[in-house]
Image (spheres, rainbow, N blue to C red):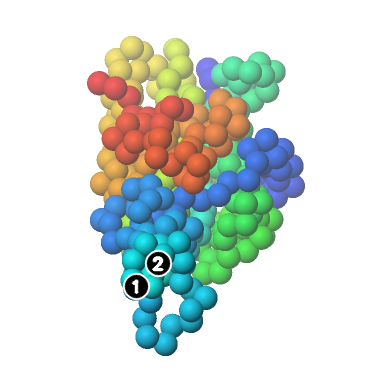
Amino acid sequence: METDQPRHPPQLDAFWPEAERAARLLGPLPLARPELGRPSWQQGSHPRRRAGQGSEFWQYRPLEPGEAVDRVDWRRSGRSDSLFVRTHERELPARLSLWADPSATMDYASAAQYPYKQHPNRQHPTKRHRALVLAAALALSAEEAGEACTALTAARPARARAIAEQLAAETAGAMHSAPAAPGDTVLILSDFLEPDRLDAIASLAAQGAGGLVVHIADPAEIDFPFEGRVELLDVAPEAAPRLIDASEDTRARYRAAWDAHVAAVADAARTAGWQYLLHRTDTPVQDGLATIAACIGAARLGATRLDAPPAEGGPPRR
């Protein structure tokens, strides 16, 4: 008989050192700036198509009456009889908003007979532990790049450690968020077993926020490696254990249900114009961070397609 039991949520000192190590390896994470006037957030960092504060050249315009002469671009003006000013495209301010699901289902970690691929003597972390490590490391790397960062439930940006403390202190229940804004990059790290999580993606996208859905999964949830008679313990302590026969028929029905769950989460993300990533807790945290950075970082944003899953994972191919 095989028994998998939920674990207690990790405290700050249980995941913060691991997050610091991971952030040092990742380095600074500058965020991609979304474009103004486009229907989808995920369009790359160029162009903005509106004059304002920014780093990208947009166009020249004639010097307006009363405007300071020191704004004249003399090289361009020298080719005509008029005076011209060099303008830049406006950038929306970027803010990274993070949420690590505190649901009871996130406390799950498969038992020791399904060990780490890299560390055979070590158990998998709980899904919540991995979500908190990823979120804290991303906050540290964004902070190092000078980016504003916040917990999704908080209205004001904060330092990375304070954000990690907020995320660890959140309790299970309905998903709540502070108002989002165009320019926000939202990361939702969850197993999406609570139905309101998918509704939250559509709500945040409707407010103009873009983002990435990081679907956290234990390898036993994906592979269903059980054999024989298996006792399943619910994450709710009042629920009675269930004894099942892990036959081939049971395995096939489970995997069909899992595939449908993954497809529903991925579809919700892509309908909102967001990206989707499936992250297994038996893979190195650094691999997950690198893939997330490829999705939201300014340097590599254009290389990630919305209609294909990032390298680390995605919905099963049928």
Q: Residues within 10 Å of mark 2 (few under 14, many from 20)?
A: some
Which amino acid is tagged 2?
Ser
**The quarter of the displayed image where residue 114 is located:** top right
In the image, residue 79 lies at what x, y percent? 37, 62
Which residue is outermost to the bottom? 66
- Callout 1 secondary element: loop
Residue 295 image-quadrant placement: top left
Query: In the visual, does 108 lie left or right of 181?
Result: right
Q: Which mark is residue 311?
A: none
Q: Which residue is pictured at 43% across the width and 27% down the height?
A: 311
Of marks 1 and 2, which one's residue comes earlier in the chain? 2
Q: Please give the name of the residue rendered at 49% of the width and 25% of the height, measured from the top-left corner.
A: 219
Q: Nearer the viewer, residue 125 or 87?
A: 87
Name the foreground residue: 51 vs 143.
Answer: 51
Q: What is the secondary structure assignment of the residue under circle 2? A: helix
Verify CB contact (< 8 Å) between mark 1 and mark 2. Answer: yes
Category of crowding for the residue at label 1, using alpha-carbon neighbours closer than 10 angstroms: few (below 14), some (14–19), many (at least 20): few
Q: Position of residue 241 (x, y in %)?
A: 47, 33
* Quadrant holding the C terminus: top left
149, 89: nearer the viewer: 89
Q: Residue 204: x percent and y percent?
A: 36, 59
- Determine which residue is flagged by label 2: 77
Q: Residue at x 63, y 45 (%)?
A: 28
Task: Estimate the x, y position of residue 78 in percent, counting from the top left.
Answer: 41, 65
Instruction: Please determine whether, in this image, residue 236 is positioned above or below residue 173.
Output: above
Q: Which residue is mark 1?
A: 82
Q: How many marks?
A: 2
